[in-house]
Each structure stands twice: as C-alpha cells, then as structure tokens.
Amino acid sequence: MSRFVILLGGELRRTPELDAQIAGARVIAADSGMRHAETLGITPELWTGDFDSVSDGLREAFAQVPCEIYPTDKDKTDGDIAIEAALGLGATSLVLVGAFGGARPDHGYLHLTQAVRLAEAGMPILLTSGAQEGQPLITGRRHSFDYADGTLFSILAFTALSGLTVEGAKWPLDAVKVPFGSSLTLSNEVRGQLSVTLRQGRALIIVHLIGPEKG
C-alpha cells in the first residue's frame, strides 16, 4: 500500500487527527499548497504546478524539494497535476489536504467532484482541512463512520439520489429519493454509530469536526 498526501491551496488547521492521517505517507505539494508543509512539519518529495501563487520566500524555504514546473496556460489545475503525479508513482490511496476553502471556489468544487470520480474507480480518498473531512459515498456500499455524538455533517449531492439511508443521525433517512438541488441532506448531526448507504447517484459526505474560529 502506498498512501500519498496531496497538499492543495485551501484552508488548513493542524490537528492530532490530521497528523495521524498523514503519518508515514508520501507527500506531493501542488503550487501554493506547499505552505501547508511548513505548518505540518513535513517535506514533500515533489512540488508541482505553474508556481503562479508561490512567494519567493516559500521557494527559498523549500529550495531542496524537486520541482516540476508547468506553463501557466494549461488545461489542468495544479492539484490535478499533483494527483496524476501521485498515481504515476503508484499511489493506492490519497489524502487531499487543504481541499476545502481558499481563494478559488472553482478549484474547491473540482476537488470534490474529482474525489468522487477517483473513488468510483476504486481509489480510497479522504479530503480534509483538519477542521472538515470529506469522503465520497460509493453506491451499493454501507459506509460506517466513527464520529462523536453531536458532530455536524452534510451529504453533498452532485446528482439526484435514490435509496439514500442514513442511520445513527438526529434525522435518519430510510431509502429516500433526494431531488438534485435539495437541502434535505444538509446540517444533520451524529447520534450513535453513523452509517450511510446510497443505492444510486453521486454524493460526498462532509463532516465538520471543528467549528469556525472566532476572531
């Protein structure tokens, strides 16, 4: 098994859970995602992207890391390039760190949909910012999660859903249909052993582990 961490340009909060998730993994940084390496105390084996969002200070701090620099005019995002590099190096599972938030909501949306696509192809994948986690829901499989009671979660649907069952939640669901664009699956809470089963459709569960910081 070869687990790869991809450092993306979104938000990050370092937590003990995140440290455990990335421990022992190989690491690739995508463009400005390299700033998370400093926060996490890790050194990637590769740094990819067009480097249009990389400061001179960041380049100097990680000058020892091998780089693959791409033209700014390209048909893939820096995160996409980093994921492809990991797959080319034999990745058997992925942790996308910095997958949520940040200055580019379009890139954030791509991370979600790309995770679903990769999971459908058989790749175990976790998206995280430290404060939030996301996992694709594979159809026909009962997904079980170990989160504390009261933990807030939502199921984000990218299509209409059918046969959605949610157990161990404040608002359970039993093989329901969910129209595309419905808010039915947002802002639920864990009550006991959370499990989710989806018969048809494409969706991802996002769990809010930590509330927003108050300034």
Image (cartoon, rainbow, N blue to C red):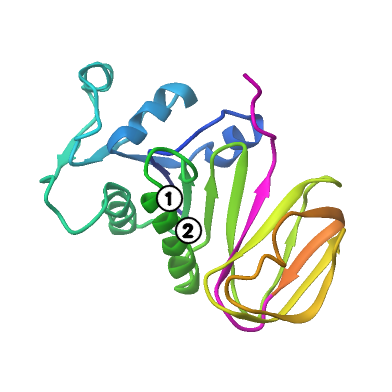
Verify CB contact (< 8 Å) between mark 1 and mark 2. Answer: yes
Query: How far apart are the alpha carbons under marks 1 and 2?
Result: 7 Å
Query: Under tag 2, what secondary structure?
Result: helix
Q: Position of residue 158 (x, y in %)?
A: 52, 70
Residue topped by disc 1: 108
The amino acid pointed to by label 2 is Leu
The amino acid pointed to by label 1 is Gly
Q: Position of residue 15 (x, y in %)?
A: 62, 29
Q: Position of residue 61 (x, y in %)?
A: 28, 17
Numbered range of the magenta stretch:
198-215
Q: Residue at x 28, y 58 (%)?
A: 88
Q: Residue at x 69, y 34 (%)?
A: 211
Does residue 148 sit above or below 139 in this rendering?
above
Asked whether residue 128 is drawn in magenta, I would say no
Q: Magenta residues: mostly which secondary structure?
A: loop
Q: Nearer the viewer, residue 83 or 162?
A: 162
Residue topped by disc 2: 112
